[in-house]
Amino acid sequence: METTLSKSTLDQAVGTRWQIDPLHSEILFKIKHLVISTVTGSFQKFQGEMVANEKEFDGATINLQIDVKSISTGQEARDTHLKTSDFFEAETYPTIQFQSTAFDKTETAGIYRLTGKLTLKGVTKEVELTAEYGGSEKDHYGNTKIGFEVSGVINRKEFGLSFNSLTETGGLALGENVKLIGNVQLVKV
């Protein structure tokens, strides 16, 4: 998976290096359909890393790349449509990228505010997400792992995903807001 974001921020970061464990992580999205139900999808291929102090993650630097072609909603026809120019335009924009600009502790224990630049379909915007620290543990092989649940909401139209259709009653088929959820386990490098 190619990345067009500069890794210089990560390369210059000082601290412990953590990589996403894709076998124990997931990246999900949820969007309203017909305003009466929610469609959930995921991306099956992604990679990323974080550089931070091993015990205090305040000030961590995070980089994530997602393979757009790995989108999955459980419906092949819908997945194919999502890869077209109506939505993600996967041939032209094969990667979604996130580069953190801040990772700050909040007043609530274990909760961080994650701010960064999200690049989706060639559009880069600053987004703010919430990261909840799940803890640290050693696996059966002696690897130190940490876990976070990251969540937030973006407006898909701000990133050029503006396709929609009208229902028989004149309503919109798709909501504008997309909930993002990342259940991420990272392994110490």
Image: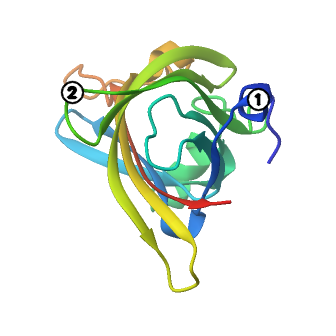
Q: Residue 6: in sight, yes or no?
A: no
Residue nearest the viewer, comparing 13 with 183: 13
Residue at 51% over, 15% down: 126
Residue in the image at 79% along x and 48% along y? 1
Left/right of residue 64 with respect to residue 9 in the rendered view:
left
Left or right, 6 with reference to 81: right
Q: Say which quadrant the C terminus sits in.
A: bottom right
Q: Which residue is mark 2?
A: 107
Q: Are marks 1 and 2 in contact (CB under 8 Å)?
A: no
* Residue 132 in sight: yes
State the image coordinates of residue 14 (x, y, percent, origin top left): 68, 35
Q: Secondary structure at mark 2?
A: loop
Q: Residue at x 43, y 51 (%)?
A: 41
Q: Which mark is residue 12?
A: 1
Q: Using the rendered view, name the quadrant where residue 29 is placed.
A: top left
In this picture, residue 64 sits left or right of residue 181: right
**Residue 164 % position (x, y):** 42, 24
What SS does tag 1 mark? helix
Among numbered discs 1 and 2, the one appearing first in the sequence? 1
Q: What's the distance in space between the residues labelled 1 and 2, CA to CA?
A: 28 Å
Between 29 and 38, the residue placed more toward the observer is 29
The mark tally for this picture is: 2
Classify 10 Å Cα crowding around label 1: few (below 14), some (14-19), many (20 and above). few
Instruction: Find residue 130 and report its horizontal and vertical position in percent.
Output: 34, 33
Coloration mode: rainbow
* Kind of residue indicated by mark 2: Glu
Which residue lies most toward the bottom here? 140
